[in-house]
Image: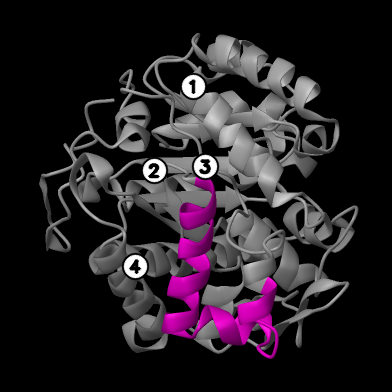
């Protein structure tokens, strides 16, 4: 894992970064054994926190994602409340699509809905690119956050975030969330040239979005492939892997930890590791020691408590947390997390106690 620079190194995009020497999250991402077990939670910023609902009461989701002060406040809330070892930028998978000028909105009870689905070569050719100016509010939010998150061993790393090309494509082709991804797979199988042109465009979009976050000062990045688990390993390698690899390779010179995560991807873990991530996220469907063998050497793992366990009471949470920590020792580094995002009805106090438990163990 020597391709990750030290926390005090120079970044070719940004210059001098925050001194976060000793930060447990960054140490684990480098394959080291830090002073304490690092823990953070996907979707920790928002959803389950009453202070989140209070501050976002009159603001639409995507509007909030483009409001720097609000992004900063929401991102900081779980750090203050839970004492997690990393903050993740409050954002959404479709934010770079919206920033590029694509008609997309998040509809309550449905999710992202695309105004004009992309299903032909002409549709792909008409897709806009992403300009730095369009991402300026997100970059400003990152700068606000790095000023608030501290330095040294007491500083909290900030994780940047983007959706992976396949997941972005699935929303664009389907026009919204899909259970079976039938239109997406139909395009993939019937018109590979248009498919690869679409994913190539989206890889450039995701890379541009992440590079702007890196330039503004994030300390790690996560490429999130929500729907990759809908694919066989064969199809993933043929139709998706080259494009996710292009995004991760485009971040290699930044020297920051690169996390790659998907849902239902137990059979894809080896291929996802080959895409170039330093840390591979693992959902709850596969034990971490088994996942570590599939991923192979040179990678840390992230995960993988089932979010539903948080509703089962403190004894069950402790039993599962201990099991996951034991299984995580099989990997070169382990960042404790959920196997997916925090569920909206989760009691925030349960998360706080889980962080305390993981740190104590």
Any part of residue 96 in sight: yes
Label 4: which secondary element = helix
Q: CA distance from mark 1 to mark 2?
A: 27 Å
Say which of 215 and 327 sits in front.
327
Main secondary-structure element of the magenta-colored stretch: helix
Report which residue position mark 2 lands on. 258
Q: CA distance from mark 1 to mark 3?
A: 15 Å
Q: Earlier in the sequence, mark 3 or mark 2?
A: 3
Say which of 297 and 63 sits in front.
63
Task: Say which mark, if any, is on residue 40.
Answer: 3
- Characterize the local packing of mark 2: few (<14), some (14-19) or many (20 or more) Cα atoms within 10 angstroms: many
Report which residue position mark 4 lands on. 145
Q: Give the extent of the magenta segment.
A: 53-82
**Tag 1 and tag 2, C-beta contact below 8 Å:** no
Q: CA distance from mark 4 to mark 2?
A: 19 Å
Q: Earlier in the sequence, mark 1 or mark 3?
A: 3
- Characterize the local packing of mark 3: few (<14), some (14-19) or many (20 or more) Cα atoms within 10 angstroms: many
In the image, residue 357 above or below residue 206: above
Q: Earlier in the sequence, mark 1 or mark 4?
A: 4
């Amino acid at each position: 894992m020597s391709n990750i620079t030290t926390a005090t190194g120079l970044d070719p995009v940004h210059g001098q970064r925050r001194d976060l020497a000793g930060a447990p999250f960054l140490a684990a991402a480098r394959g080291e054994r830090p002073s304490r077990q690092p823990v953070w939670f996907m979707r920790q910023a928002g959803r389950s926190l009453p202070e989140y609902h209070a501050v976002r009461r009159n603001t639409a989701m995507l509007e909030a994602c483009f409001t720097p002060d609000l992004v900063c406040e929401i991102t900081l809330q779980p750090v203050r409340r839970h004492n997690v070892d990393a903050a993740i930028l409050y954002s959404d998978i479709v934010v770079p699509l919206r920033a590029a000028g694509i008609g997309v909105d998040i509809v309550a009870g449905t999710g992202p809905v695309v105004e004009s689905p992309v299903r032909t070569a002409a549709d792909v050719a008409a897709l806009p690119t992403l300009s730095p100016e369009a991402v300026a509010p997100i970059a400003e939010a990152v700068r606000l956050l790095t000023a608030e998150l501290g330095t040294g061993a007491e500083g909290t790393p900030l994780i940047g975030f983007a959706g992976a090309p396949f997941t972005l494509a699935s929303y664009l082709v389907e026009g919204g969330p899909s259970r079976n991804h039938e239109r997406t797979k139909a395009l993939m199988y019937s018109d590979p040239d248009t498919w690869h042109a679409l994913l190539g465009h989206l890889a450039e979009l995701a890379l541009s979005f992440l590079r702007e976050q890196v330039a503004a000062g994030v300390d790690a990045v996560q490429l999130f492939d929500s729907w990759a688990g809908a694919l066989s390993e064969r199809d993933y390698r043929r139709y998706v892997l080259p494009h996710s690899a292009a995004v991760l390779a485009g971040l290699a010179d930044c020297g920051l930890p690169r996390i790659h995560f998907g849902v239902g991807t137990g059979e894809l873990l080896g291929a996802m590791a080959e895409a170039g991530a330093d840390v591979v996220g693992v959902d709850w469907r596969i034990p971490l020691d088994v996942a570590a063998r599939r991923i192979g050497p040179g990678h840390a793992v992230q995960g993988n408590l089932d979010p539903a366990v948080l509703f089962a009471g403190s004894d069950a949470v402790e039993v599962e947390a201990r099991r996951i920590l034991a299984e995580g020792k099989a990997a070169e580094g382990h960042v404790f997390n959920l196997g997916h995002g925090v569920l909206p009805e989760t009691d925030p106090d349960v998360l706080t106690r889980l962080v305390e438990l993981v740190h104590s163990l």
